[in-house]
Amino acid sequence: DFMRDVSGLIAMEKQLKSLLGISKVLVLPQDSDDIPAVKSNIGKEAARLLEAFFPQYKKIAVTGGSTMAAISKELSSDKRDSLLQFIAARGGLGEDVLHQANTIASSFAGKTGGSVKTLYLPDHLSEEAYEMMMREPVIKEMMDLYDQTDVVVHGIGNAEEIALQRQSSTEEVERIRSGGAVSEAFGYYFDKEGKVVYRIRTAGIQLEQVQKAPAILAIAGGRSKAKAILSYFRNAAPQTILITDEGAAQKILELT
Ligand code: BG6
């Protein structure tokens, strides 16, 4: 911890904790926007925190994204536990297959010897299709699992970037823009006050289910995500742990 203290990271963690109203923040040195290895360091830290939960918590919901993929690379295979259950937080097929929640959940399970629950559904269902899907037993089973989730591990994205990357319809992009969305996490879009302004119509974990989970790890770094992180944490559950980097942390403190 000496090195972290010298570079002022511990002071930053303290400031962020009180600013965001949460109990734990980890800030890794440097900025993942400039140095890709920083994302791996974030992944490593997140993997260690998650592994520390394994003896106590078995049902773990995960989202997609490159930061989540970085965690999966760092999970240690000597923490294997066949009772672990990894649940894809969303059925969405709207993004690059390697970064989909389903892929990430499978790879977490592969690394840890746990089991996996996946759900493959289009990211943007029509209202009719959505209503019908929600009545399907497999989806109901998934919804029950979300209700029993012990840990949620998720990334945070910039709203507009995610909307475009998901090939959302122009109408959807317009609603996200006009709603003033700044951040996105597990299919929900939040404005700068942390209010939900839009949500993807597909089967997935509900905000209320995330917020009642005993443990939540939110993982996002890089100064380009500072505004998004701030927006998300305006309304995040107090038990959320943020794992980020110096680039994002510094920018968040500048913005506030
Ligand atoms: C998406 C997730 O894949 O990644 C989002 O569905 C998340 O929930 C976003 O916000 C963050 O991605 P990345 O690649 O920047 O970690």
Image (tube, grey):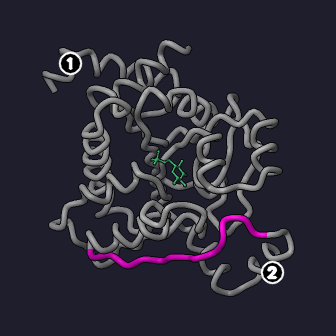
Depth check: give the residue in front, 38 or 212: 38
Task: Give the x, y percent position of residue 26.
Answer: 34, 33
Q: Residue at x 38, y 21 (%)?
A: 14
Whether 56 is drawn above or below 243: the answer is below
Q: Residue at x 58, y 65 (%)?
A: 90
Number of the label disc, if any, that sits on residue 5 = 1
Whether 59 is drawn above or below 215: the answer is below
Task: Give the x, y percent position of residue 111.
Answer: 26, 69
Label total for image: 2
Q: Alpha-carbon neighbours of circle 2 within 10 Å: few (<14), some, or many (≥20)?
A: few
Main SS, magenta region, reads: loop
What is the quadrant of the C terminus in the image? top right
Q: In the shown orientation, is residue 145 left or right of residue 18?
A: right
Query: What segment is highlighted magenta in the picture?
Result: 113-125
Query: Within 8 Å: ligand 1 and the Cβ of disc 1?
Result: no
Q: Residue at x 80, y 76 (%)?
A: 129
Q: Residue at x 45, y 51 (%)?
A: 215
Q: In the shown orientation, is residue 146 left or right of residue 136?
A: left
The amino acid marked with disc number 2 is Met
In this figure, which residue is indicated by the disc labeled 2?
A: 132
The amino acid marked with disc number 1 is Asp
Task: Give the x, y percent position of residue 109.
Answer: 34, 72
Cα distance between the residues tagged 2 and 1 = 54 Å
Whether 101 is drawn above or below 50: the answer is below
Can residue 170 be found in the magenta stretch?
Answer: no
